[in-house]
Image (cartoon, grey):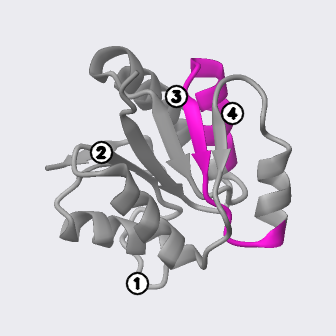
Amino acid sequence: MVIKPFVFTGTRKPVTDEQLDQMYTIMRRLKDQHGYNRIFHGCAKESDRRAHLMAVALGLDRELYPSNDEQETWASSQRSGGTTIIYPMRPPLDRNHYMLDRAGTNTRLIAVPHLSVEEIRSGTWATVRYARMLKRRITILWPDGRVEEEQ
């Protein structure tokens, strides 16, 4: 089987119901219509973990990239249903760059920001900026439910 991953990054703050609806819709579409079969995420509380549960429900394989002990402990408890690979801890920004680099040129980034404007001091937005630099396809799921596609 050819692995076709997408990378997920999102807020550690509560996500909106509109974002949750779009997360599931987009992830299902990536799987069913575009052949994506694996999610890479950073194990952060809130949006990463919600995306993880959606990936399990959709039958996607998962690669987990924790950045601290709490995330590593959580990741270790998530080994059910399909393939789950847990990578060694890395600092958050290094980890996010590593996920995009590892996923390759044909990947897509799904970003779920906390606010409706780009922030300078935000791991989610730093990852989006890195994906832009790499010319990766990006899907931003805004708090009001709007979906913005780049590239």
Quarter of the image with the N terminus in it: top left
Mark 3 crowdedness (10 Å alpha carbons): few <14, some 14-19, many ≥20 = some
Count of numbered labels shown in the rendering: 4
Cβ atoms under marks 1 and 2 closer than 8 Å: no
In the image, which disc is placed on residue 24? 3
Q: Where is residue 106 in the image (x, y as percent from the top left)?
A: 23, 43
Is residue 73 left or right of 42 when viewed as pictured? right
In the image, which disc is placed on residue 120? 1
| Range of residues picked out in magenta | 49-69
Q: Is mark 1 on a helix, strand or loop?
A: loop
Ranked by sequence position, the earlier of labels 1 and 3 is 3
Q: What residue type is labelled 1?
A: Ile
Which residue is pictured at 72% across the width and 23% down the height? 81
Q: Is mark 4 on a helix, strand or loop?
A: helix
Check the image and report above or below for 105 versus 11. Answer: above
Q: Distance between the residues labelled 3 and 4?
A: 10 Å
Q: Distance between the residues labelled 4 and 1?
A: 29 Å
